[in-house]
Image (spheres, rainbow, N blue to C red):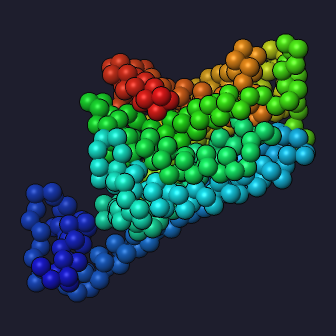
């Protein structure tokens, strides 16, 4: 088949305009010689416009997710002491720089290359190309995946703040972007073994693949480094307050904004506007509910509302809804956000007081614990007919698959 013939054949397969006016699926395609040049032009213009819109949407979402780096940097800086601000900002800048090259060189191929069920191809400068199957340029898909990898890497920074050697942190960031995140991503999004379970593991935008994985790595890093000097002294816990809740609040607002690229952008196109709008709705509802739940919980528990914890409550709701934002109802999203907002308070207390792990920004609780929790909630609250949760007439199999995925990536 000649290139021009192939182009028209592809157009015919994609467009309903090539069928008869009744739209019947059984109708035979109209032969090429009976189709006017004008109709061909209309069809190709439609396909070209759709391709351009989908590409713009993915790249715009990638910009929003990239802007989340600013949010993380401000949250971490605000929750830390003034003397460490420059170091924190420097680390956030360099983990994106280092991670970009590492993911381009190695990580992308491991995550999306053809390979075993555990990892893709181990090839430098991978030539993996998903443009044809996704309907967007491969470079657009790569950039979107890159900013996700950067998010996973920067989560670790907060828990290890104020006591990490710069060189060691850079190596940690490279390892996350080049190996650790791509392997877990391959299991779920790259055709790996979790996506091949009898009931596939569902994590739409990364509650576990991105956030929980980053949270567990943050826990390992914080536990290995030990606490900041003066945090646990003579058997007592001494609070080390951050220097600017203003910066932290601004960071949370930026992260909230960025999540509107993180979750809806994971549709990778505007082919289903209802789904995109639905994800916007569930994402926002969970965030708002998380903040309200944390406000009430801290008010009841401590006698007054805690602003810093409420900021983390908003993030907890966002993290928790990321796995099921496409399949839960708006009411389900609010319930998940409310529970995550309560959970984050007790998780922060437990890690700080019982485990004696010093996490200045609560990254382990927000991302690790609430990410795992939100992923499990898909097994209960999913309203999708193809993946019904227990509360919607489904079997326990969905919940089991979610638990397998959470445990596998945590391990």
Image position of 82 with respect to 127: above or below: above
Does residue 126 appear anywhere in the picture? yes
Residue 61 falls left or right of residue 396: right
- Total numbered labels: 0
Question: In this orientation, which residue lies closer to the viewer: 24 or 179?
Answer: 179
Instruction: Residue 121 in the image: state x and y as whole percent.
Output: 34, 54
Residue 172 falls left or right of residue 394: right
Instruction: Residue 285 in the image: state x and y as whole percent.
Output: 62, 37
Q: Quadrant of residue 350?
A: top right
Residue 206 falls left or right of residue 302: left
Does residue 71 appear anywhere in the picture? no
Image position of 159 with respect to 23: above or below: above
Q: Residue at x 43, y 29 (%)?
A: 408
Residue 131 falls left or right of residue 77: left
Q: Residue at x 65, y 42 (%)?
A: 155
Instruction: Residue 165 in the image: state x and y as whole percent.
Output: 74, 45
Instruction: Residue 8 in the image: state x and y as whole percent.
Output: 20, 77
Question: Where the N terminus falls, by quadrant?
Answer: bottom left
Q: Residue at x 74, y 28 (%)?
A: 226
Question: In this orientation, which residue lies closer to the viewer: 411 or 270?
Answer: 411
Image position of 89 with respect to 283: above or below: below
Extreme-bottom residue of the structure = 37
Q: Residue at x 79, y 21 (%)?
A: 298
């Amino acid at each position: 088949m000649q290139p021009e013939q192939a182009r028209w054949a592809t157009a015919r397969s994609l467009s309903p305009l090539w069928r008869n006016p009744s739209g019947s699926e059984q109708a035979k395609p109209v032969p090429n010689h009976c189709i006017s040049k004008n109709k061909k032009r209309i069809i190709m213009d439609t396909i070209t416009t759709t391709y351009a819109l989908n590409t713009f949407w993915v790249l715009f979402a990638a910009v929003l997710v990239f802007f989340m780096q600013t949010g993380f940097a401000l949250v971490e800086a605000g929750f830390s002491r003034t003397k460490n601000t420059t170091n924190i900002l420097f680390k956030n800048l360099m983990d994106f720089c280092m991670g970009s090259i590492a993911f381009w060189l190695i990580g992308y191929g491991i995550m999306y290359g053809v390979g075993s069920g555990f990892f893709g191809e181990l090839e430098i400068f991978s030539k993996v190309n998903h443009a044809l199957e996704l309907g967007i340029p491969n470079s657009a898909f790569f950039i979107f995946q890159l900013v996700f990898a950067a998010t996973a890497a920067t989560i670790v920074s907060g828990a290890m703040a104020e006591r990490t050697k710069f060189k060691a942190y850079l190596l940690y960031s490279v390892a996350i972007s080049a190996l650790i995140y791509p392997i877990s991503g391959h299991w779920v999004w790259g055709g790996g073994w979790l996506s091949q379970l009898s009931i596939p593991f569902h994590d739409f935008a990364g509650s576990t693949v991105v956030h929980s994985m980053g949270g567990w790595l943050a826990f390992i890093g914080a536990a290995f480094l030990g606490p900041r000097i003066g945090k646990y002294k003579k058997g007592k816990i001494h609070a080390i307050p951050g220097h600017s809740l203003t910066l932290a609040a601004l960071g949370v607002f930026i992260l909230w904004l960025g999540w509107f690229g993180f979750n809806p952008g994971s549709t990778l196109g505007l082919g289903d506007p209802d789904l995109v709008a639905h994800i916007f709705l569930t994402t926002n509802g969970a965030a708002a509910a998380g903040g309200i739940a944390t406000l009430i919980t801290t008010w009841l528990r401590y006698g007054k509302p805690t602003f810093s914890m409420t900021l983390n409550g908003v993030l907890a709701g966002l993290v928790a809804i990321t796995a099921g934002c496409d399949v839960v109802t708006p009411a389900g999203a609010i319930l998940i956000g409310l529970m995550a907002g309560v959970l984050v308070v007790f998780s922060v207390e437990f890690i700080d007081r019982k485990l004696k792990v010093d996490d200045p920004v609560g990254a382990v609780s927000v991302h690790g614990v609430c990410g795992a929790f939100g992923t499990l909630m898909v097994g209960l609250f999913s309203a999708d007919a193809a993946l019904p949760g227990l509360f919607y007439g489904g079997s326990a199999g969905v919940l089991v698959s979610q638990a397998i995925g959470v445990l596998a990536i945590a391990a």
